[in-house]
Image (cartoon, helix red, strand yellow):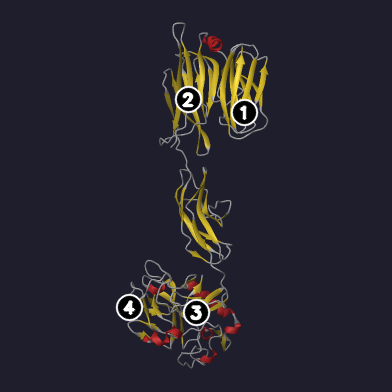
Amino acid sequence: MKRFFLSMLLVLAGMALFPQVNITVTFTAQDVDSNYVQLNRVSITNLTKNWQETIYWPDTTLTMFFDTGIEDDYLENRGLTLSQSNPNPCDGTTEFDLAVPEEDPVHLEIADMRGIVETFQATSLSRGLHHFRVTLPSAGTYVMTARQNGKTSSIKMVCSRGGGSLGIDYLGEGQAISHSMKSVTINPYNSNDRMLYVGYADICGAEVESEHIETQLFYPNFTLNFSQALCFLPTVSTNLVVHYTDTTAAGGGNVVSDGGAPVTARGVCWSTSHNPTVSDNHTNDGDSTGVFASNLTGLVSTTTYYVRAYATNIMGTAYGDEVSFTTWPPFYCGTDTVTDIDGNVYHTLQLGNQCWMKENLRTRHYSDGTPIQHGSTTSSNVAYWYYPHNDSTIVPLYGLLYNWTAAAGGAPVLNLCPERWHLPSMNEWSQLEGYVHSQSQYWCEYYSAHYIAKSLASTIGWGYSSNSCAVGNNITTNNATGFGAMPAGGFHNGYYDFSGAAYFWSSSRSGDDNCRHFSLTMGSSTPSWHSHPSYYGLSVRCIHD
């Protein structure tokens, strides 16, 4: 970490027998964890002679004189003294000090490198320290010169940007100026005076005070210790956006460290331009460390977005690395079709707020191209697909059967359904059932009761049932919804219930190795829910994200 410092120059002069001596004392600071701290200011108190001076960052020196008449000698023998301006470089205006040894008029002159000169004539300055402000019209280097009775002193000023017309203004005498680069005091000082040094710095958003150093000894360097620990920006990482549609997306991040101060906000921000900030669209996802999830809404289809996670504490807002994704083009359910990784095309169906495939899934690969094994036995660990009824010719109508390991994505998790589609949860199957039951056009009425199983079943393939409103009773009246469930049966060490039942996996478990499925049977007038072990082979219908 860069070291910041303040220092104090003690100009010590002896009696007539001793030459004048310049001594520089450097102040540095550190927090309780030994991290370097930038000081705002240092208070310097002479406890013996009861005076105090304060130097400010980025001040570097304070000039003091022995209390032996050396002050007069200094002002008269060394003469006129300009202090370095602050700030330097400046942004159009800066301030400086002038030590005046006698009360005669002082002439100030400032010139730029082109020779343009501005003057200031002071006719009534008293002996001592005086303060001025200078305005610099444009970027460049300037030279300030003071003249009095044949004595001169000069300093160089660097301007990074103009601040108006070239000019010099008198601010006053004494301690009117603060933050001067080389402060000069005429307060008395002896080498055996007892001195007190106290530093002040901003730590975690508040100015705090360092330890007090009280000493009669001279050291070239003083380290001012603070009992607090510095705060830093939080550390945050951005998760990939792995689930998105034409208008929404899901992302998130991880606040790895709070930086030593409580996190007050976290989330993700996004934009169509690089390096989004919280001034752009963003989420608010809590106020702590750890992993968090975010939902991005209001997106525009077929558009590339840039995303960064963020976390805020008292020190400011930190951002994670940038990730990007492109939203899908709009999808019109019931009109548009969907194609799986093997090139199989499926029609789509809008039922309430849900969009379903109208046919059973028949891919032999995950959506990323990873193959799924053709099974001849069962397994809860290996992903398998099976021909329905052990007949490859009926796959276009009945789809394939999958064990739950394949349907739910195996390990690591992969997506069996095409991109933007997924295996329905138990709640999504229940939502389908509730919607169909709410629509009278889908009812089969029997003794004032309303049944819906027939409206979800196909008009072909089902065995016969004499039960009124059962799926297998007069199958030509089935499929009012268009869902078209085919009775593909299942597989468990052999095929069963072909033409008698349609079993559809859900993504929901009901035990250690039992998983829920949605069922229609030829003798029943209502859908049903059951659980089977994950090694069973059942049909899969996909639902749109």
In the figure, residue 489 lies in which quadrant?
bottom left
- The crowding category of the residue bearing disc 2, from other C-alpha atoms within 10 Å (few below 14, some 14 to 19, many at least 20), is many
Q: CA distance from mark 3 to mark 1?
A: 80 Å
Q: CA distance from mark 2 to mark 3?
A: 78 Å
Marks 4, 3: nearer the viewer: 3
Residue receiving disc 3: 346
Picture quarter with the N terminus: top left
Q: Is there any visible trace of residue 187 in the rendered image?
A: yes
Residue receiving disc 4: 378
Residue receiving disc 1: 114
Q: Earlier in the sequence, mark 2 or mark 3?
A: 2
Q: Is there any visible trace of residue 225 in the rendered image?
A: no
In the displayed structure, 227 sits above or below 286; it is: above
- The crowding category of the residue bearing disc 3, from other C-alpha atoms within 10 Å (few below 14, some 14 to 19, many at least 20), is some
Kind of element beneath mark 2: strand
- Three-letter code, disc 2: Ser
Residue receiving disc 2: 7
Q: Are marks 3 and 1 in contact (CB under 8 Å)?
A: no
Q: Which mark is residue 184?
A: none
Kind of element beneath mark 3: strand
Give percent across and percent down for residue 105.
65, 13
Marks 3, 1: nearer the viewer: 1
Q: CA distance from mark 1 to mark 4?
A: 92 Å
Q: CA distance from mark 1 to mark 2?
A: 35 Å
